[in-house]
Amino acid sequence: MTRPRAPRRGIVEALNTSFRHWSLLPAVLVFALLTAYPIVNLLRMAVSTIEFRDGREIWTFTPLRNWDLLLADTALGPVVFNTLVFVVVAVATEVVAGLALALLIGGLTRGKALMRTLMIIPILVPPVAIGSMFKLMFNHDFGFFNQLLSYAGMPPVSWLGSTSLALLSVILVDVWHWVPFIFLILFAAVEGLPKEVLEAARVDGATRGQLLRRVTLPLLLPALTVALVFRSILAFKTFDEVYLLTGGGPGTSSELLSLHLYKVFFEQNQLGYGALLSVFTITGVLALLVPARWLTRRWALQ
Amino acid sequence: MSIMMKMSAASRAALLGWMMLGLALVIVVGPFLWIAVASFKQPIAILSGTWSFTPTLDNYADVLLSKRSDFLAGVRNSLTVATVSTTLVLVVGTLAAYSLHRFAWARWVTLGFLGWTLAFHMIPVLTLVGPWYLAFKQLGLYDTRAALILTHVSINLPMAVWLMMSFFRDIPPEIEQAALVDGCHPLSAFWRVVLPLVVPGLIAAGVLSFVFSWNEFSIALNLVSQTNATVPVVVAKFAQDYEIQHGQMAAASILATIPALVLMVFGQRFIVQGLTMGSVK
Amino acid sequence: MASVSIRHVDKAYGPTVVMKGIDLEVADGEFVVLVGASGCGKSTLLRMIAGLEPITAGEIAIGGERVNELEPRERDIAMVFQSYALYPHLNVRSNLAFSLELRKTPAAEIEAKCKQTAGVLDLAQLLDRYPRQLSGGQRQRVAMGRAIVRQPRVFLFDEPLSNLDAKLRIAMRTEIRALHQRLGATSIYVTHDQVEAMTMADRMVVMNGGRIEQIGAPLEVYDRPGTLYVARFIGAPSINVFEGSVEADGAQARLRTRGGQHIALPWFVESGHAAPGRAISAALRPEHLAITADGSLHGTVSVVENLGHETYIYVDTADGRVCVLAERSLRLPPGAAVSLAPVVEALHLFDAPSGQRIDAGDARR
């Protein structure tokens, strides 16, 4: 009995046999065209000057000029410093606060679901909206924080306008934004702790303090490491809130790396210099992957 | 305080937990409440910081309806960009994730691909906006929603791939093998057997991708102009204008937050799953 | 070492009462096994003794002192968990030493005790390994070592052998028993496996639905089950049960089974239990049925199981499948018709509605 072969069958057969390949192809294409190619372009841009005349792009090969711009960039030093301070302080605060919350909420019998629901909100809100909300709240004249200070009988503070406080305010907003994320990760880990191991420790004689120090925290180390490493690397990407809150000011006291890149590219229109900075930034961030991997390997994969 | 002493250690810890919960509630919800109140105030009421005032809808009217506001246009643009990019991300990402999971690619392929997604996920987006700017200008795609869609796809693809891979890993291999034994081709096994099993993953990845696309700012700021501006760009405009319009800023912030709250109500479970899974590589 | 006393203990989760009126006295040095099906409450009872579950009503005392309000660590007990619950981030040595370090025991003493315990349980080679590197049996021994090293008053075991394969389980059973004989420690052991209970216990506590069905030495419980539940639960293969009603005609009484067969009830009339029509259940162990030429029960051979040292023949009768312990030499093909003779003196009789045992010496009901 011969089966009729409809022409459509041929295409389906072909799709099936090559499924292996064409399923991966789109993603590879996306990455190749939209990420790899632009990065290669960055290298080209880093050694050129690009100008627009009469609506056309003009490229000139000027390898040294961008270097000169970098060395002359007085803002760069403070920016790098600010970024490092930001990452260290914000992430440390976020991890400690998130851990404390996860442990305390983990001990509750009810209310956990409410907490989880609550903590999703800051992650879903547009960072721009967070920036604008806190900009209003930090307002010197009518903002929420200065209202609180006035109730306590204290003079108003210029949260966003003073060089000493601007970076702190940015860090505060970042903490508000990201503690919930850290909390969710650590909370999942706390819930996943082996119950009988904790009970065994209680039977073996551990007080609450000993239980925390000798059993709970060591068992949470993998999740803590992941949260710490992940958040640290993501912290370098911060842009939206800073742009809204302070625009980097006053001066450069709250300017972070991403914001500086933006300014160089789109306010100063120095595409070549910006590309050079980008190359350094990318290398720097990727270099951080090495200690991150080492840390994770040592503490997270027991 | 003597009550505290009489309670056992366990109840003390529980009390502390409840206090933390209350505090967290206040800290997380507080800003929204304060901004919501401000959004209903007249400019004078805002500046004077009074708590008794006559509420007004002027700010919202100004944001949504006035000629000089692009908010509604921004919503349209954001909706288009987010929906299309999410669809693409889900299709491309799920296929790629399944391919890496199911078909034994050479080690360098898998590691290379996943490593690249990881690396790309980590570098600040603004490093690429420059080359993108030039590239899209050359292609004539500068200031189009297509440019935003393409870049958003590339940004959200890593998360989608990682997320879907972890969901695929949770499916017992015997199920796929049973499908093949029953006579399925790899494609139909995927389509009819595996895919229905990872619907929660698709929802999680879809919701997250949509939200991140909607919220995306640094690319939208630089690759499109006013006509194609997305919601975050419009909101930023209110904050940057020469005369700061506080009431409208507050109203715009609240309006921008609404999609997030809606999604939270409906997609909670998936979101949490997605976020915690996605980060535990 | 100490005794454990459980008096009128109730347990409720909110409004749901899961355990009522539990009374049990465990003597110093005794090995008591709590046995029952899943959900009967045996683990809950053990955890209440340990202090991991609160006691709703009643009192638990260890060594004569009430422990209801005491935290687990204040009760001087040790527990071996079903999943072993070893500390995954510590090696075997640290796992053993953990409880001693918590009490700030001097290092030399810790070292000595760990060495000794490791020697007893054959763990000396494994001291530097981590739990994830150990096999199931090795982990089990470390869990026991952790309990032993502290020399507590009472040992609690929560189904420690359930996760091991059959052969290992049998080997560990004898190990635990030997250890108990050596240490003489008061032990309360929970299991769902009645073979474990029979082979290990000084006394067994059969539990069902949050109540104690019977307490007694293993053979005592085997020979004189106090309720139909206990008769069914203890003994493998299961006891054969015939349900029916009493037929009496003056001097003779017999059971008319549901399937229409008859079993004589010799002492029923003399003791005054023979109310005609009374619903009772009669139970007979497989070893108390014989395949003869003229037995009162009839059926066809269904399945023959040759275990090497014993042969069990399953016979389909009008009252269902009956299991008979038979001679190896008996060769019966499936489908063969046979008749069975019950050893009437070994009949266990139970009142059908209550499940309670009916004895000759009992008062007339």
Image: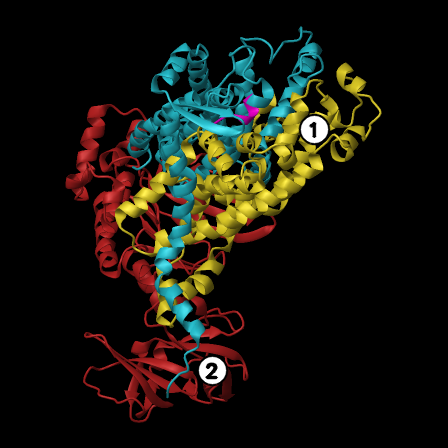
Chain colours: A cyan, B yellow, C red
Image quarter hosting the C terminus of chain A: top left
Q: Is residue B152 left or right of residue C326?
A: right
Q: Chain of mark 2?
A: C
Q: Residues within 10 Å of mark 1 (few under 14, many from 20)?
A: few
Q: Are tags 1 and 2 found on a single chain?
A: no
Q: Is residue C213 above or below residue B40?
A: below
Residue interval drawn in magenta: A237-242
Report, in whole angstroms, how far the alpha carbon at label 1 lies from the one at label 2. 86 Å
Place of residue C200 in the rendered image (x, y in percent of width and height, measured from the top left): 28, 56
Q: Which residue type does callout 1 highlight?
A: Leu
Q: Nearer the viewer, residue C135 or A210?
A: C135
Disc 1 to disc 2: CB gap under 8 Å: no
Q: Is residue C231 visible?
A: no
What residue is shown with label 1? B33
Please tell me which residue is depicted at 19% across the width and 37% down the height of the picture: C127
Q: Nearer the viewer, residue C210 or A89?
A: A89
Place of residue C174 in the rendered image (x, y in percent of width and height, measured from the top left): 22, 55
Place of residue C135 in the rendered image (x, y in percent of width and height, measured from the top left): 23, 49
What residue is shown with label 2? C269
